[in-house]
Amino acid sequence: MPRALITGITGQDGSYLVDFLLSKGYEVHGLIRRASTFNTGRLGHIYVDPHLPGARMFLHYGDLSDSGQLTNLIYNVHPDEIYHLGSQSHVRVSFDIPEYTGDITGLGTTRILEALRRSGIKARYYQASSSEMFGASPPPQNEKTPFYPRSPYGAAKVYSYWMAVNYREGYGMYASNGILFNHESPRRGETFVTRKITRAIAAIKAGKQKELFLGNLDARRDWGFAYEYVQAMWMMLQHDKGDDFVVGTGQSNSVREFAEEAFSYAGLDWDKYVKIDKKYFRPTEVENLIADASKARKILGWEPKITFRELVRIMVDSDMEEAGLTPPGEGRRILAAKGFPIGSKL
Ligand code: NAP
Ligand code: G4F
């Protein structure tokens, strides 16, 4: 049975990756942080008591700031594949806590890579790199586009990207960078703009919210569906050698367009509800991201199936369901029609 270790297992991508790897017959180990409240909400639907026979997901306490525990974990789990997804992943927040972001999102990578190198274990390593590294470089962006990060988060991810490349070239380790463009889902963190919009729509429909405050509506992002992006991560590690791949849809939409599409799907007029609050603007912004994912298509055979419009429908439906409302219902139909093995927990 192949064994995977995931940092960031409690996050959006980590939780979909567990779903996917378990379906592929893996035993999965994950790093979780100690918190005063449960932080495993995204894993509840697949959690099986580890005392029971047949349990294949195991959670271990630790933190990306603690190299001793990371070393211990890699040594004890002895993984075949490591997916390093853990990070302080919020770009706006990275301006408020730049040092912490550098420590966790940047140095956290070095702690894992160094623990792996010293262990002598020949695991394949996946680095969660980001389109945020391209920053101000004009689109379309591919593996050859120069990095020009526009946030402490972007700068920390550029550092991590190069550490993965250096461990690959310097020590012959198998390390791949997945340069993923924005990917969203019903499990997206509630303060990222897409989820903030779809949750607000559900709250407005339920009569619990009257307005939605946003920042820059003109920023454009290449938004895809997260479940397809964790499949791309796995496909990268099945490739015969470590390499770097851009993953995205090739289509970009503005925040305004996302809001228009989502409100109108729910039968609401977006500009009656959306207001601007300057506090959501960033000191430096990434204006436009559009992936050129031709390398991933050609070498890995990866291609996204879910379009922007479909993604919006999946997310609005899910948040309306969560609010106890009856959604228009196209989201689940789209997932079923396109063969996604996502059951009750979208
Ligand atoms: P996410 O939902 O914010 O999840 C981040 C994960 O990192 C959570 O499990 C979190 O744990 C964990 N974490 C944070 N600080 C930690 C620490 N000090 N020690 C250990 N774990 C820590 O992020 P995501 O959207 O799944 O993204 C996964 C990875 O891909 C991240 O590295 C992100 O930067 C990168 N990325 C994301 C996108 C995207 O569009 N989603 C695009 C490109 C790259 P808690 O649950 O305890 O907070
Ligand atoms: O949803 P966002 O916060 O995502 P952002 O900054 O693009 O970062 C996400 O994608 C990266 C990949 O490119 C990941 F690496 C990163 O970890 C994260 O997952 O913001 C998207 C856009 C920005 O231009 C922002 O200025 O939406 C704009 N925006 C407008 N109003 C807002 C808001 N963003 C947030 N979070 N909240 C707002 O009210």
Image: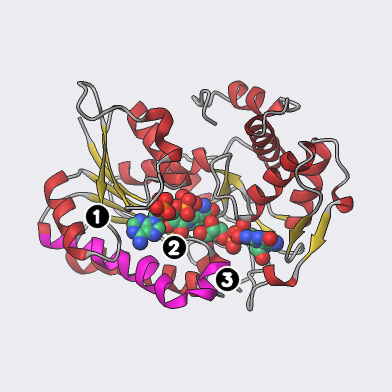
Q: Circles 3 and 1: CB distance less than 8 Å?
A: no
What residue did someone put label 1 on? 174
What residue did someone put label 3 on? 135
Q: Amino acid at mark 3?
A: Gly
User: Where does the image place residue 345, in percent across and percent down from the top left?
Assistant: 51, 29
**Where the N terminus falls, by quadrant?**
top left
Marks 3 and 1, Cα distance to the nearest angstrom?
27 Å
Q: Amino acid at mark 1?
A: Tyr
- Horizontal side of 276 relative to 286 (left or right) equals right
Badge 3, how many Cα within 10 Å: few under 14, some, many 20+? many
Q: How is the image coloured?
A: secondary structure
Q: Foreground: 179 or 331?
A: 331
Q: Is residue 337 visible?
A: yes
**Which quarter of the rendered image does ligand 1 occupy?**
bottom left
Q: Is ligand 1 less than 8 Å from the beta carbon at label 1?
A: no
User: Where does the image place residue 238, in percent across and percent down from the top left?
Assistant: 31, 41
Q: Amino acid at mark 2?
A: Gln
Q: Is ligand 2 less than 8 Å from the beta carbon at label 3?
A: no
Disc with the residue nearer the chain's start (1 vs 2): 2
Instruction: For mark 1, give the secondary structure.
Output: loop
Marks 2 and 3, Cα distance to the nearest angstrom?
18 Å
Residue that extends furthest to the front in the rendered view of this protein: 36
- Residues in magenta, as a range: 92-118
Instruction: For mark 2, give the secondary structure.
Output: loop
What residue did someone put label 2 on? 88
